[in-house]
Image (spheres, rainbow, N blue to C red):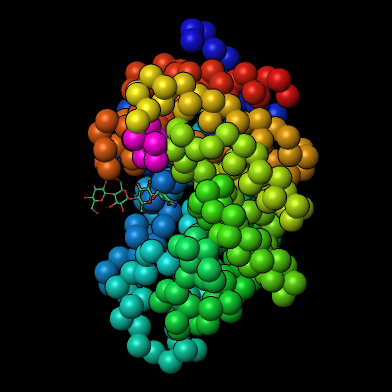
């Protein structure tokens, strides 16, 4: 599709993209981000895996670079992630201090990172992927073991709010479109946080989906999530061609379904009340930027091709945003 208007020009809410600091040196990507995007999510460099050094010290060069690029280009930044089961650095594992000592280190990390970006991020994925893989209960982690299944989560939100009085504090998770039971557990956790007075002020649904996802699943999920009443971040959208369950679909058919799936995601998000549309974020703007390429080089999950040209998925997004 030729001369498509930029996504951020037609969408009545922020359009996000994941980004890695090093890739900002690439003129093609920087130009595409400037044209299309109004919010950035550091793909991994605002996580503990990047920030916490083996000796327990913190490094911020890469996330600072992403924030500087965003500020120079009038883009918002979504802080991703303060607490995640998947990344407990050695420096924390090694802490065999009492619970008080561990809690202090946990709080200090959140205060240091959320404090550093106070006034520079529109929100934080304070806790990422807290619900168990099968949707039955919550995940165990170093954090849950040392500080309590629910308490470590509530403490993270309270501490993030202490560091940043204004940012939207989100709970982010995946497979909420594929697994109604996981979605129900996610909503119950959100409701329990709200009931406990934790400053949860948004929810994120990642939307790592396959091209053959059943039409309507995304729409059903969005309506269900909207019932909580909080702002919603469609936080990590990509539409895989190779993760399709149906192995009998040809590439052409998969590409058509991919475009339709991008369209349904955009339509479902557009159907939310304006105050519940936090942002709509793509996880990998061009195929080459996608984490899925590491898994299978034949995948082409993004809305733009490697040269930054819009694919059918981008056209479907524009079409849905325009219909507004
Ligand atoms: O580029 C560096 C390389 O220079 C270094 O030598 C190497 C060894 O440390 O690391 C490389 O960075 C890797 C980075 O991806 C860039 O490719 C990190 O190891 C690797 O951990 C990182 O993976 C990221 C992953 O989260 C874990 O943080 C992926 O990019 C990122 O797409 C993925 O994103 C997650 C979301 O945060 C949460 N939802 C699921 C989503 C996909 O897994």
Identify the residue at horizontal 54%, vertical 25% (top origin).
260
Q: Is residue 201 above or below residue 241?
A: below
Quadrant of the image occupied by residue 308: top left
- State the image coordinates of residue 174 (x, y, percent, origin top left): 50, 52
Q: Is residue 228 above or below residue 21?
A: below
Q: Residue furthest front?
A: 248
Q: Residue furthest top?
A: 2
Q: Is residue 106 left or right of residue 91?
A: right
- State the image coordinates of residue 252 (x, y, percent, origin top left): 38, 19
Is residue 89 visible to us here?
Answer: yes
- State the image coordinates of residue 193 (x, y, percent, origin top left): 68, 70
Q: Is residue 39 left or right of residue 243?
A: right
Identify the residue at horizontal 59%, vertical 41% (top origin).
217
Q: Is residue 79 left or right of residue 167?
A: left
Name the quarter where the C terminus is drawn.
top right
Identify the residue at horizontal 45%, vertical 83% (top origin).
146
Identify the residue at horizontal 54%, vertical 12% (top origin).
4
In this rendered view, identify the residue nearer to me: 151 or 130: 130
- Give the residues drawn in magenta, as a range: 238-247
In this rendered view, identify the residue nearer to me: 316 or 126: 316
Mainly helix, strand or loop, the magenta region? loop
């Amino acid at each position: 599709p030729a001369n498509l208007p930029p996504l951020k020009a037609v969408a009545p809410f922020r359009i996000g993209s994941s980004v890695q600091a090093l890739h900002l040196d690439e003129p093609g990507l920087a130009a595409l981000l400037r044209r299309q995007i109004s919010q950035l999510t550091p793909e991994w460099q605002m996580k503990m895996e990047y920030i916490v050094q083996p000796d327990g010290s913190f490094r911020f060069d890469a996330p600072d670079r992403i924030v500087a690029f965003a500020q120079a280009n009038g883009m918002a930044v979504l802080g991703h992630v303060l607490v995640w089961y998947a990344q407990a650095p050695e420096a924390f594992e090694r802490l065999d201090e009492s619970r008080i000592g561990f809690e202090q280190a946990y709080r200090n990390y959140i205060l240091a990172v959320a404090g550093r970006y106070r006034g520079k991020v529109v929100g934080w994925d304070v806790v990422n992927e807290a619900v168990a893989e099968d949707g039955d209960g919550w995940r165990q982690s170093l954090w849950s073991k040392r500080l309590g299944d629910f308490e470590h989560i509530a403490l993270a939100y309270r501490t993030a709010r202490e560091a940043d009085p204004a940012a939207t504090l989100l709970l982010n998770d995946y497979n909420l479109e594929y697994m109604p039971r996981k979605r129900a557990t996610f909503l119950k956790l959100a409701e329990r946080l709200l009931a406990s007075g934790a400053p949860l002020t948004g929810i994120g649904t990642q939307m790592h989906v396959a091209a053959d996802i059943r039409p309507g699943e995304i729409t059903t999920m969005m309506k269900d999530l909207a019932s909580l009443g909080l702002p919603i971040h469609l936080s990590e959208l990509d539409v895989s061609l190779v993760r399709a369950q149906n192995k009998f679909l040809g590439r052409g058919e998969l590409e058509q379904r991919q475009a339709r799936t991008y369209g349904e995601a955009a339509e479902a998000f557009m159907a939310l009340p304006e105050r519940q549309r936090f942002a709509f974020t793509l996880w990998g703007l061009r195929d080459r930027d996608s984490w899925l390429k590491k898994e299978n080089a034949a995948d082409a999950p993004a809305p733009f091709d490697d040269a930054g040209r819009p694919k059918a998925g981008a056209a479907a997004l524009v079409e849905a945003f325009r219909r507004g």
